Amino acid sequence: MSETEKMFAGKIYNPFCEGMPEARRRAHELCQQYNQIPESDTQAREAILQELMPDRGEEVYIQGPIQFDFGTHIKMGRRSYANFNFCVLDENRVTIGDNVFIGPNCTIMTPIHPLCHEDRNIFYDEESGTNVNIEYSAPVTIEDNCWIGGSVTILPGVTIGEGSVIGAGAIVTRTIPPHSLAFGNPCRAIRAITEEDRLSNHPELFAEESNHC
């Protein structure tokens, strides 16, 4: 297996070979450029996203600032949205479904470093003649119609089921079932989202006269 194949397979790999450092550096530069472009310059922002994160559906909107490690490992579905300070360490695949709302200051992480420092620390690799370290990774999936609240951190290997809501500040360490309200540290499903949660069952939230723009 190549080092890239190992990375996607969740095996130990060397992140400093096969063009990975150059790809990360290019992604970081594109993120910096994106973050400096005014929101009104939609054409320039779109051009950067086309190179940085080409696998995205129609009407995706990424507010910025952003920080991605590769960008090309992220897939984002139609009409999904990410607010300010969206950070994705996409050493493995990150799949975001359709109509996903991501609040400000959210982080998705796929890389995993060894727990023992003897395995984790930088060492000299005689074959390549460079200093390297090793890591592994696990993919993250956010299914359709989810809402990820502000300042949520999603850890490697997590799947958030369709239609779930993750409360602000949660650290998601395990898979969340579909149609769940989940929050806390570590995040856990508190209850199911039901028909009772529909706005039509809460008329007290509406003004007597509403003019929708």
Image (cartoon, helix red, strand yellow):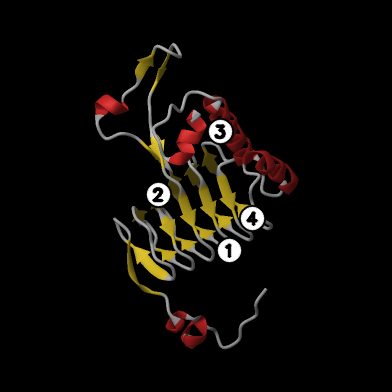
Percent x, y for residue 50? 69, 43
The residue tagged with tag 1: helix, strand or loop?
loop
Measure the alpha-carbon separation of dots 3 and 2: 24 Å
Mark 4 Cα shell of 10 Å, populated few (<14), some (14-19), many (≥20): some
Q: Quadrant of the C terminus?
A: bottom right
Measure the alpha-carbon separation of dots 2 and 1: 21 Å
Say which residue appears at 50% left-offset and 61% top-offset.
143
- The amino acid sitting under disc 2 is Gly
- The amino acid sitting under disc 3 is His
The residue tagged with tag 4: helix, strand or loop?
loop
The image quarter containing residue 186 is: bottom left
Marks 1, 3: nearer the viewer: 1
Q: Residue 99 got which mark?
A: 1
Q: Residue 28 got which mark?
A: 3
First along the sequence among labels 3 and 2: 3
Pick out the residue farthest to the right. Answer: 43
The residue tagged with tag 3: helix, strand or loop?
helix
Can residue 91 be seen at all in this image of the molecule? no
Q: Tell whether 26 sits left or right of 11.
A: right
First along the sequence among labels 1 and 4: 4
- The amino acid sitting under disc 1 is Asn
The image quarter containing residue 111 is: top left
Evaluate if marks 4 and 2 touch, with contact meaning CB atoms under 8 Å apart. Answer: no
Say which residue appears at 60% left-offset and 30% top-offset.
26
Percent x, y for residue 95? 53, 52
Identify the residue under disc 2: 157
Q: Residue 60 got which mark?
A: 4
First along the sequence among labels 4 and 2: 4
Mark 2 Cα shell of 10 Å, populated few (<14), some (14-19), many (≥20): many
Measure the alpha-carbon separation of dots 3 and 4: 20 Å
Q: Tell whether 183 sits left or right of 29.
A: left
